[in-house]
Image (cartoon, grey):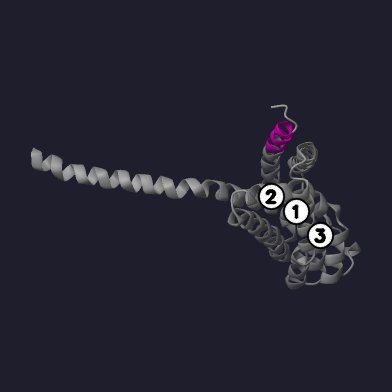
Amino acid sequence: MIRCANLQYPSLVVELRISHQYRSFCDPMAPQITFLFSGVVFGLSAGLSPGPLLTLVISETLKHDIKEGIKVSVAPLLTDLPIVIITILVLSRLSNMLPVLGVVSLLGCAFLTYLGYESITFRGVDIDVEQAKPQSIRKGVIANFLNPSPYMFWFTIGAPLVLKALKISLFSASLFILGFYVFLVGSKVLVAVVVGKSRFFLKSRNYVYTIRFLGVILLVFAVLFLKDSLELFGII
């Protein structure tokens, strides 16, 4: 009986040590995974939801081929860098002005609520191919620069989350930005490929339900932004 106990006890110690090491490894990763998940959700929502750039992606694909649609899909990689840098620099200067950041978070809540509502009530995309004029990546870049959505997103949602992630680590902020742009561009590329093979995809149940599901998640994030706003105002 003593030998049996002696044999079992070391194994229990090993299990406890492994469990402790596993928790020690996972706990620091939790915030980083959260920011990565946030980037993925926002990227998917921005990439799949109807807008000027997605319309260009679809029209280029239908009028020409999948390759032209993919060219338009990468426009955010060419246009968003100055937007991201400027909004982060501006908000970082306001980091000590809690009421101002409270207003920004409140605007983010309102913007997310609007996007969530638009997504939940989404019914599909209609494109008139006959009226769709040939576009190029140059026009895709111009369209994205003139589109207010990137500015609204980065000022009210993206930049505040990046600044919050930077308080944890540069890696956390990098994961958010990487997740956002990989899924933003990747989802538009996917739309170009699928539409190039079947134009009925834009009215399919899978596409509609995916957008609506993302809308529900956006509303959850809207509630979190509202909570942040109330905390910055000192209400809660």
Work out which residue is located at the far front of the displayed protein and give it: 96
Q: Is residue 110 above or below residue 66?
A: above
**Res. 79 in view:** yes
Residue identifier under label 1: 88
What is the x, y in percent for residue 100? Answer: 80, 39
The span from disc 3 to disc 1 (Cα, nearest Å) is: 24 Å
> Where residue 181 appears, x then y in whole percent?
68, 59
Report the predominant secondary structure element of the magenta stretch: helix
Please give left or right for residue 73 compared with residue 23 in the image.
right
**Magenta-highlighted residues:** 224-232
Figure quadrant of residue 101: top right
| Front residue (pair 93, 131) | 93
Mark 1 and mark 2: span between their CA atoms? 7 Å
What is the number of the mark on residue 8?
none
* Residue at (75% x, 60% y) in the render: 199
Q: Secondary structure at mark 2?
A: helix
